[in-house]
Amino acid sequence: MVRSRRYLIDTNVLIWWMADSPRLSENIKNLLINSQSEIFLSVVSVWEVVIKKQVGKLRPPRDWKITLEKQKFEILTLDLPHVFYLEKLPFLHKDPFDRMLVAQALSEKLTLITADEKLRQYRVKVLTT
């Protein structure tokens, strides 16, 4: 039996995926549709999209909710162990959403797919876009 790889996508990857952006490399696009990989989407990223949309910092595609429902991403909920893991993280990054995604990736032993090079400082496994 081949063990699948497990990835958590950062919010920037989610946004680029929904918009079919050229900023997302072909390698990452292929990985996201690879059935042998487990791709996790955190509710934290969805939360971030909603907030950025409300304050006018982001205009997701009109059908973004439907697009998400059709994807085969595993939904990663936010649980107390994830929040408590934040205490282990040095305060290297001010964005609370990114810090929470790092905590989730570390506590769940997931590789984080991101374009944010700052997140490497946390010693989380990172796959860059």
Image (cartoon, grey):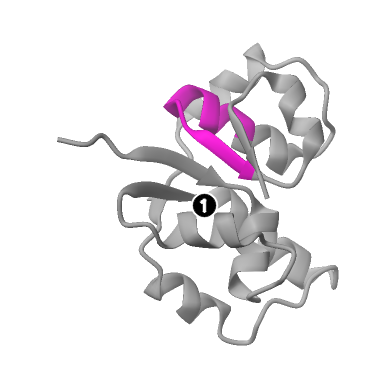
Residue 13 against residue 100 in the figure, above or below: below
Q: Residue at x 62, y 31 (%)?
A: 102
Question: How far from the left and from the top, in percent, is residue 30?
Answer: 48, 60
Extreme residue in the bottom direction: 62
Q: Residues within 10 Å of mark 1 (few under 14, many from 20)?
A: some
Q: How many labels, in total?
A: 1
Q: Is residue 57 magenta?
A: no
Location of mark 1 (residue): 43
Question: How far from the left and from the top, in percent, is residue 75?
Answer: 40, 52
Query: In the shown orientation, is residue 31 left or right of residue 85?
Result: left
Q: Secondary structure under badge 1?
A: helix
- The magenta stretch is 102-113
Q: Residue at x 63, y 87 (%)?
A: 62
Extreme residue in the front direction: 27
Figure quadrant of the N terminus: top left
| Nearer to the camera, 109 or 51 | 109
Query: In the shown orientation, is residue 19 left or right of residue 64?
Result: right
Q: Is residue 81 visible?
A: no
Residue 13 against residue 125 in the figure, above or below: below
Q: Amino acid at mark 1?
A: Val
Q: Residue at x 40, y 38 (%)?
A: 6
Q: Residue at x 36, y 47 (%)?
A: 37
Q: Is residue 110 magenta?
A: yes
Residue 115 against residue 120 in the figure, above or below: below
